[in-house]
Amino acid sequence: MFEQEYINCGKLIFTDTSVHVYKNYYDNRNLNNIPGGRIVNAYWQGNHINVVMDSGKTYVYNDFNGWSMYF
């Protein structure tokens, strides 16, 4: 589970291949185990992060270690 500071901050910045998750203005961590392909969107939904790939699949992250499911 993501620490509450990350959820409260709610800031994400994504590139084609990575997602930076912020816990304050300066401190951030990257999500691990991003699938191959290009990231087209990343957003918070409750206490998890959805990462949308150019394949059309959305991967759900409940923590920094990796995705738990996709749809």
Image: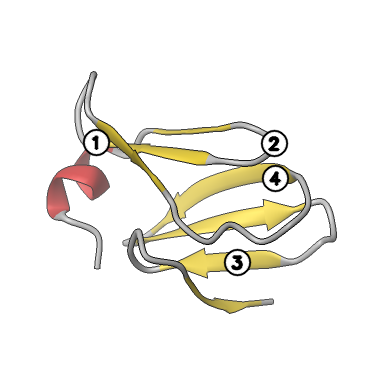
Please tell me whether mark 3 sits on a helix, a strand or a loop.
strand
The residue drawn where x is 52% and y is 68% is 60
Give, as a three-letter code, the residue at label 1. Answer: Cys
Give, as a three-letter code, the residue at label 3. Answer: Tyr
Q: In the rendering, which numbered label is found on residue 9?
A: 1
- Give the CA distance from mark 1 to mark 2: 22 Å
Labels 1 and 2: the sequence-earlier one: 1
Give, as a three-letter code, the residue at label 4. Answer: Ile
The residue to which callout 2 is attached is 16
- Give the CA distance from mark 1 to mark 3: 21 Å
Tell me residue 7's x, y (percent): 25, 49
Tell me residue 4's x, y (percent): 14, 53
Tag in front: 1 or 3:
3
Up/down of 62 relative to 16, above or below: below
Residue at the farthest right position: 55
Q: Are marks 4 and 2 in contact (CB under 8 Å)?
A: yes
Labels 1 and 3: the sequence-earlier one: 1
The N terminus is located in which quarter?
bottom left
The residue to which callout 4 is attached is 39
Labels 1 and 4: the sequence-earlier one: 1
Tag in front: 2 or 3:
2
Mark 4 neighbour density, 10 Å: few (under 14) some (14–19) many (20 or more): many
Labels 4 and 2: the sequence-earlier one: 2
